Image: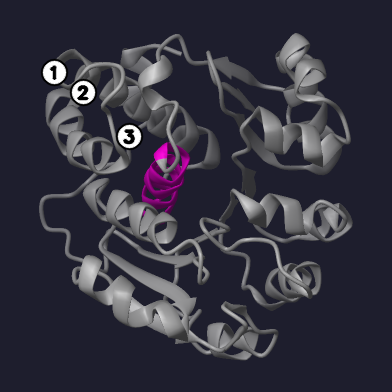
């Protein structure tokens, strides 16, 4: 992966474009204990150029989320004990007509009935590209048959721990064989995979592999991955292919982390810093 390629793969923005031109992202996430994660995803998606972002969160955390992200639209969803309820899927169905890309998982947490919730979500979509991250990965791990049968593009963005859970391996096993594991998992499950960690790996169902030469410990903080999910989703909503979105987003995310560390230190780069830095790096790239 090179900066030239990342720049080439960025979605094109016509000068006459408007908010409808640049796509509508639906972010599904959050729970009573994890309010911030879906907000990071939504803000990152907007800073990466999405025309509209709707945040679908449990209704009890909607007031907190709305205060922190007034630039987003909101879909307060039915919940049980601070998590999504199964009948929230009916609300989501009614909002899908104009959605161009979906991100699911940030802050969603693991909950009773979560596996059924994820199966129901996949069955309800209209073929939009869907990015699955965080506990969305945990809740779909026993339903990969539904993922393989999905009519649209599916993107998984696990860190090594989540990859280990998906494969019932140890993290050590994953880290020893990152390229082989990413390649095999993407091909076997007909998905696009971004395996995070040092030198992130992108794998396609066709066997293509990209390795990100950038990124370091400044990104090693909760919320960094939620930002990446937002960037990927925004690029998909703007018409990029999965590989284009993943390559550009991964490079942009890592480069932003490196640049922010120069002024904030490797210790002090937080998700809001990355979200702000997206705009700075996009300006430089374009």
Alpha carbons under labels 3 and 2: distance apart: 21 Å
Q: In which quarter of the image is the C terminus?
A: top left
Q: Mark 3 points at which residue?
A: 10
Total number of numbered labels?
Answer: 3
Q: Residue at point 39% right, 53% down? A: 41
Alpha carbons under labels 3 and 1: distance apart: 26 Å
Task: Return the disc, 3 or 2, that comes first in the chain's sequence.
Answer: 3
**Tag 3, which secondary structure?**
loop
Residue 266 drawn at (x, y percent): 30, 16
* Disc 3 residue crowd, few under 14, some 14–19, many 20+, Cα 10 Å: many
Q: Position of 193 compared to 170: left or right?
A: left
Query: Does the rendering let one see residue 69?
Result: no
Q: Mark 2 points at which residue?
A: 260
* Disc 1 residue crowd, few under 14, some 14–19, many 20+, Cα 10 Å: few
Q: Which is more toward the observer, 13 or 160?
A: 160
The stretch in magenta equals 224-239
Q: Position of 57 compared to 45: left or right?
A: right
Q: Mark 1 points at which residue?
A: 263
Query: Does the rendering let one see residue 252?
Result: yes
Q: Residue at point 31% right, 75% down? A: 64
Task: Return the disc, 3 or 1, that comes first in the chain's sequence.
Answer: 3
Q: Residue at point 42% right, 33% down? A: 221
Residue 74 drawn at (x, y percent): 35, 79
- Per the rendering, the mark at residue 56 is none
| Res 25 quadrant in image | bottom left
* Disc 2 residue crowd, few under 14, some 14–19, many 20+, Cα 10 Å: many
- Confirm or deny contact between disc 2 and disc 1 (CB under 8 A): yes
């Amino acid at each position: 992966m090179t900066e030239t390629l990342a720049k080439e793969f960025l979605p094109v923005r016509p000068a006459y474009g408007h908010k409808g031109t640049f796509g509508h992202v639906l972010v599904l996430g959050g729970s009573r204990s994890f309010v911030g994660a879906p907000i990071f995803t939504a803000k990152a998606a907007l800073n990466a150029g999405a025309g509209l972002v709707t945040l679908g969160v449990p209704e009890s955390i909607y007031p907190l989320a709305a205060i922190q992200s007034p630039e987003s639209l909101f879909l307060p969803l039915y919940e049980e004990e601070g998590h999504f309820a199964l009948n929230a899927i009916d609300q989501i169905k009614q909002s899908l007509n104009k959605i161009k890309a979906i991100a699911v998982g940030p802050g969603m947490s693991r909950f009773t009935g979560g596996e059924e919730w994820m199966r129901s979500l996949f069955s309800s979509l209209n073929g939009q590209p869907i990015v699955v991250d965080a506990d969305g990965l945990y809740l779909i791990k026993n339903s990969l048959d539904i993922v393989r049968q999905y009519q649209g593009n599916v993107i998984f963005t696990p860190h090594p721990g989540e990859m280990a859970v998906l494969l019932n391996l140890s993290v050590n096993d994953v880290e020893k064989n990152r390229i082989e594991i990413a390649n095999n998992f993407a091909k076997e499950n007909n998905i696009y995979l971004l395996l995070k960690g040092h030198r992130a790996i992108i794998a396609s169902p066709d066997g293509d592999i990209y390795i990100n030469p950038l990124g370091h410990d400044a990104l090693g903080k909760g919320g960094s991955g939620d930002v990446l999910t937002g960037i990927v989703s925004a690029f998909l909503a703007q018409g990029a292919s999965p590989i284009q979105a993943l390559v550009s987003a991964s490079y942009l995310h890592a480069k932003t982390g490196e640049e922010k560390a120069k002024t904030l230190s490797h210790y002090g780069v937080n998700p809001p810093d990355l979200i702000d830095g997206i705009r700075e790096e996009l300006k430089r790239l374009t």
